[in-house]
Image: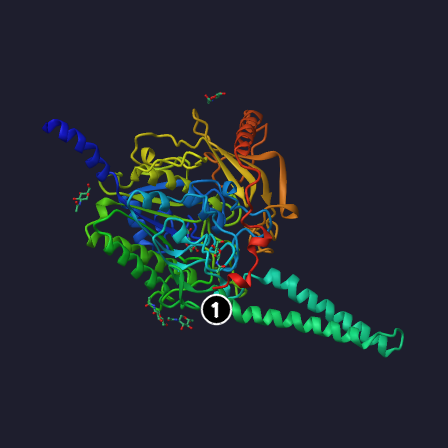
Amino acid sequence: MAPLFLLLLLPALDAARTKPNVVLLMADDLGIGDPGCYGNKTLRTPNIDRLAREGVKLTQHLVPTPLCTPSRAAFMTGRYPVRSGMASRSQVGVFLFTACSGGLPSSEVTFAQLLKDRGYSTALVGKWHVGVHCHNKTDFCHHPLRHGFESFYGISTTNMRDCKPGAGTVFSRAFRWLVFVPLQALGVTLLMLGALRFLGLVLVPPALFILLALLAAAILLLFLAFLRYFRPLNCFLMRNFDVVQRPFTYHNLTQGLVDEATQFIQRNTQTPFLLFLSFLQVHTALFSSPAFTNRSHHGAYGDAAEEMDWAVGRILDALDRLGLANDTLVYFTSDHGAHVEEVTPRGEVHGGSNGMFRGGKANTWEGGIRVPGLVRWPGVLRPGLEVDEPTSTMDVFPTLAALAGAPLPRDRIIDGRDLMPLLRGEIARSEHEFLFHYCNSYLNAVRWHPKNSTSIWKAFYFTPNFSPPGSNGCHDTHVCLCHGRHVTRHDPPLLFDLSRDPRELTPLTPATEPRFHAVLRAMAQAAQRHKDTVPRHVTNQLSMGHLLWKPWLQL
Ligand SMILES: *[C@@H]1O[C@H](CO)[C@@H](O)[C@H](O)[C@H]1NC(C)=O
Ligand SMILES: *[C@@H]1O[C@H](CO)[C@@H](O)[C@H](O)[C@H]1NC(C)=O
Ligand SMILES: *[C@@H]1O[C@H](CO)[C@@H](O)[C@H](O)[C@H]1NC(C)=O
Ligand SMILES: *[C@@H]1O[C@H](CO)[C@@H](O)[C@H](O)[C@H]1NC(C)=O
Ligand SMILES: *[C@@H]1O[C@H](CO)[C@@H](O)[C@H](O)[C@H]1NC(C)=O
Ligand SMILES: *[C@@H]1O[C@H](CO)[C@@H](O)[C@H](O)[C@H]1NC(C)=O
């Protein structure tokens, strides 16, 4: 009797041991050149560095697409964002208004949902940015609580320059075309008509003058109303479905997130939990509490990054204090590379560092897609291990599913792969032979790590036109765009071997690389096989209709 009883018990014990708590830490816009453990000597990130020392450091950790909204959708679902309609076909690739109607479809399954179904307590603290409403302001159809999180405290969209008085605007391009150019045109027309009438050359009816003047006044009024009401309408903190602070205050924002996160951990010492702490830092508008302001060697950006690192430390301290560290997998990453175009009119650098890598946020040069990736699980993962193989933020989904003993959804393609065998050192090669790098909904580049070779081939079908030419970003448009005159197409594709040229400086040619055509052929075939798996008729959640501000959805 006893042995049989034990046999029945053993798998249960084993499952309990391998069902760790999970803490996911995601920075916003942090570059791979920022943390000390990735080579920065002047920005102080002792707590992030501690994760690297006590855990595994991924040096080729990649996001599938270099913008917040689609990257986060992919992270939480383990799928390329084109599969869920979370990839834009226009110039705007992210949600800019809380009262928009697009978002992560309810048919998508997040890791929070999987873990909740396996008995985990789940919480999101911080930034969401994948939609709130569909049809009316009570449906909350895209809200975190509809995607497996049992509690939510944070902001539903994103921290933006426009949320902080004096920090500038992300709408300057829109203002130019919707406000300033029309106002100028109307002004010039009025003047010309006035002159013609004065000279008696044309009989201009007074009604036309009044109409044009009214039109100009209306445009001006709408513009002023937008400036006045943007902050209260978009920059607020929520607890679950309720608005709790409008507009949010920056001076204690990080402290608020940390308090919320540590209280959640404290409440769940007896149950497995999933905490997703999604920082608002280091996105612009940059902010830090008085204790961190003017302290770093890198201005407001450094202050914000160092405060975020402090927050990471507070979470690790809480795990230590409660004796949970050994039962908790902690993961740290960024949603994409640093935003290199973030320089204020006064020349202050408000974007981070992508180290030696080219490009940054909003393009698929390595600087845009290669992000920090740290995983700590004491007693299970070897401290100080470095993994140079290609891995993806999409891998978190199947990894957590496996740890929680949750079967993967069978009715859809999951693009991520379980990371544990690689992290544990059980296998040496990544299961990602091919990875696809997207710019919005456009397949921008393909990466191939052939099974029998050390090469990391990367082929670009197009590259963004940097402006001014010769710079390392798209300063004229503030972010690089993905199509039309903003890109240069390449046929044959631009080919690099990142194992020899990680900075992507010298494209290969048939003269410098004898396998040139064979490699490109294999990659083109893989790209075609991949494209064939992407559904053509999925609803575009980032269409203009979905992106626009809808007064009836305003909370
Ligand atoms: C909001 O939409 C949901 C789902 O479409 C519907 O069930 C609900 O009745 C609507 N609420 C209001 C107040 O119209
Ligand atoms: C932050 O400060 C504001 C007042 O400026 C206060 O209303 C809010 O409760 C504070 N938040 C936290 C988390 O302490
Ligand atoms: C930081 O420095 C700026 C400029 O010197 C100053 O205006 C501001 O008051 C300082 N802030 C703090 C919290 O020390
Ligand atoms: C360290 O980070 C700061 C802030 O992003 C950046 O200015 C600096 O260039 C970085 N240093 C290195 C060596 O990357
Ligand atoms: C946690 O795990 C480490 C490494 O296996 C071990 O040295 C340490 O004693 C453990 N701590 C606790 C509190 O069990
Ligand atoms: C790797 O395998 C492919 C076929 O799968 C073969 O064409 C190629 O020559 C091999 N390369 C090396 C370096 O062995």
Q: Position of residue 531 (x, y in %)?
A: 55, 34
Q: Quadrant of residue 111?
A: top left
Q: Position of residue 155 (x, y in %)?
A: 42, 60
Q: Quadrant of ligand 5?
A: top left
Which residue extends farthest left? 2
Q: Secondary structure at mark 1?
A: helix
Which residue extends farthest bottom? 198
| Dot 1 beta carbon under 8 Å from ligand 2 | no
State the count of labels.
Answer: 1
Q: Quick check: can you spot residue 73?
A: yes
Question: Residue at coordinates 44% horizontally, 35% vertically from top-left?
Answer: 411
Question: Residue at coordinates 70% horizontally, 66% vertically from top-left?
Answer: 182
Q: Is residue 507 left or right of residue 323?
A: right
* Residue occupied by mark 1: 232
Residue type highlighted by circle 1: Pro
Q: Is residue 484 left or right of residue 23?
A: right
476 or 1, which is in the foreground?
Answer: 1
Q: Looking at the picture, does residue 123 appear above or below residue 492?
A: below
Q: Residues within 10 Å of mark 1 (few under 14, many from 20)?
A: few
Question: Residue at coordinates 89% horizontally, 77% vertically from top-left?
Answer: 200
Q: From the image, which quarter does the N terminus lie in? A: top left
Way the structure is coloured: rainbow
Q: Is residue 431 left or right of residue 311?
A: right
Q: Quick check: can you spot residue 61?
A: no
Q: Position of residue 167 (x, y in %)?
A: 49, 67
